[in-house]
Image: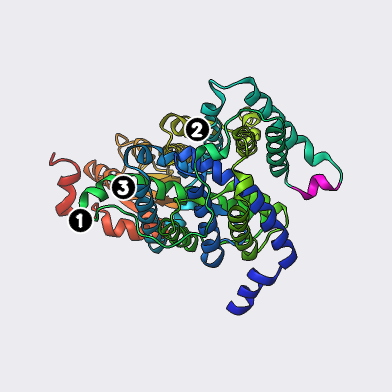
Amino acid sequence: MLLSSTKQDWFGNIRGDVLAGTVVALALIPEAIAFSIIAGVDPKIGLYASFCIAVITAFVGGRPAMISAATGAMALLMVLLVKEHGLQYLLAASILTGVLQVIAGYINIGSLMSFVAKSVVTGFVNALAILIFMAQLPELTNVTWHVYAMTAGGLGIIYLFPYLPIIGKTIPSPLVCILTLTIIAIYFQIDVRTVGDMGDLPDTLPIFLLPEVPLNFTTLEIIFPYAAAMAIVGLLESLMTATIIDDLTDTSSDKNRECKSQGLANIGSGLLGGMAGCAMIGQSVINVKSGGRGRLSTLIAGVFLLIMVVFLDTWIKQIPMAALVAVMIMVSIGTFSWESLMQLKTHPLSGNIVMLSTVIVVVWTHNLAYGVFVGVLLAALFFANKISHFMYVETKLDADNATSIYKVKGQVFFNSADKFVAAFNFKTVVDKVIIDLEQAHFWDISAVAALDKVVIKFRREGAEVELVGLNSASATIIDRFGIHDKPEEIDNILGGH
C-alpha cells in the first residue's frame, strides 16, 4: 500500500508534473529575488532557500504538489534582524525556526487547523496581499518616470499576454514581463535600478556551512523571538495553503507531517546559506492549475530554479527592479480575496468582524501570527455567544401544582451557565422539582457548577430534586466535578451562608 502510494506521488503524473514544475521554477525566480530584497539580503539567499526548501519538502512534505520556498510573509519578519545583526544571525534564526517547526509537528500542532475559521483564513490571505503590496512602495517612491512606465507596462503584459491564443497559455506571463522589460531596459539603456544593484547572484551551487555566530545564550536571546515568530507564521501559511490545495485537488494531506517537513526544509536552508521559508499560496495554485499533482512537480521546480540561476546569472543581473515590482503587485492582486469584499453584504456581521480584525491587526503589526491569533479568538467568542442563545428551559407544573418540571434544551457551558441558572424559579413553593436533561449537554465545570447551584438552591427551599435524561458524557463530568450530592461540599458553593 505504501509502495503504491509512493509510486503514485512520484510517477503517477510525470508529464503534468514536469511541465507544471518548469512553469513554477520560471515564476519562482523573480519572487525569490524580490522576497530576498524585502528581507534586506542578497538575492542568492532567497534563491538558495527556494531551491533547498522546494527539494526537501518534495521528499518529506505532507502535501504533494504544494510549492514551498522563500516567501514574503517570512521575509517581512526578517527585516529588523538582518538590519540590526546581519546575515549570519538570520541563518541561525532560520535553523532555529526549523527546529521549532519539527517540534510542533511532533506535538501535533497541525491538528489545530480545525480551529481556524474560514473568515480568519480569508483575513490572513487579504492581509498577506496588502503587506506584499506595501513592500513594493519603496521601489516606487523618489524614482524617475521610467520606473512607473515600466511597472505599468509590466502589469499590462502580465494581464494581457494570457489572452493570446496558444502561446498565452503555454508561457507564464510574469516571465514574459521580465524578459520584455529587461530587453527594453538594455536596448534603450534606461537608467533604472536592476537586480545586479541589489547584490551578487550565486554562480555556484550552495555549500554546507554553519552560521558564524557565538554559541551562547546571548545569541539565543537575539534570534529566538524572530525564530518563534517565523515558525508560527510559516506553519500558519503552510497549513492554510495545504488546506486550499486539499480543496482544489479533492484530496487530503497530513498536516502534522507538513509541519515536520517545513522544519526540516528550513534547517536545511539555514545550513546551505538560505533564509527560512514556507508554503506559497500563489505558486501552489499555479502548480496545481498547470497540471501538477505529485511530488515530482515540487522537485522539478526547485532543481530547475537553481540550474537557471547558476547558469543564467549574467542575464538575471540585468532584470530591472520595475519588472519585479510588477510581478509582486500581480502576486498581491491575485492573492487578495476580492470576493470577500462583495460578501461583506451577505456574510454574518460576526464573520466580517473576524475577517477585518485579522487584516487590521496584521497590517498594523506586520505580524501574521498576531492577526491570526486575534481572528481565532474573536471567532471563538462569537461562536460561544451564538451557541449560548440556543440554550433555553421550558417550565410547567403538574396537575396538583406540587411538582415543577423543567425541560432543558441546548448546550450548557461557561457562556450559557448564568442563563441556565436564571431560567429556574426558586420562589415557587413545590414539593418536588424534576429537571429533564435529555436534550441538554453539559460541557465544562462552569456548567456543572451552575447545575450544582440550581439543585442546592431548590433543596434549601425544601424541594426534592430529581435529574432525569442525562447523557453519558454529561453524567461523567457531573459525577466527577459535581458537588450537589456531596453534603460536606454544599457550603463551599454557597459561600458558607
Q: Is residue 128 above or below residue 115?
A: above
Q: CA distance from mark 1 to mark 2?
A: 50 Å
Q: Is residue 474 above or below residue 189?
A: below
Compare marks 2 and 3 and give the one earlier in the sequence. 3
Find the magenta span and give its range.
166-171
Name the mark on residue 246. none
Residue annotated with mark 3: 223
Which residue type carries mark 1? Lys
Percent from the top left, x then y, of residue 458? 27, 43
Describe the element under mark 3 as helix, strand or loop.
helix
Residues tagged 1 and 2 counted as in contact (Cβ below 8 A): no
Residue 195 visible to the viewer: yes
68 sits to left or right of 382: right
User: Residue 351: within the magenta?
Assistant: no
Which residue type carries mark 2? Val
Compare marks 1 and 3 and give the one earlier in the sequence. 3
Mark 1 or mark 3: which is in front? 3
Name the mark on residue 486. 1
Query: Which residue is drawn at the image coordinates 33% and 39% (left, top)?
Result: 421
Screen quadrant of the N terminus: bottom right
Which residue type carries mark 3? Ile
71 sits to left or right of 224: right
Mark 1 or mark 2: which is in front? 2
Q: Main secondary structure of the magenta part?
A: helix
Query: Which residue is drawn at the image coordinates 35% and 43% (left, top)?
Result: 86
Query: Which residue is drawn at the image coordinates 70% and 57% (left, top)?
Result: 20
Query: Which residue is drawn at the image coordinates 48% and 59% (left, top)?
Result: 206
Percent from the top left, x then y, of residue 265? 47, 59
262 sits to left or right of 489: right
Percent from the top left, x then y, of residue 267? 41, 59
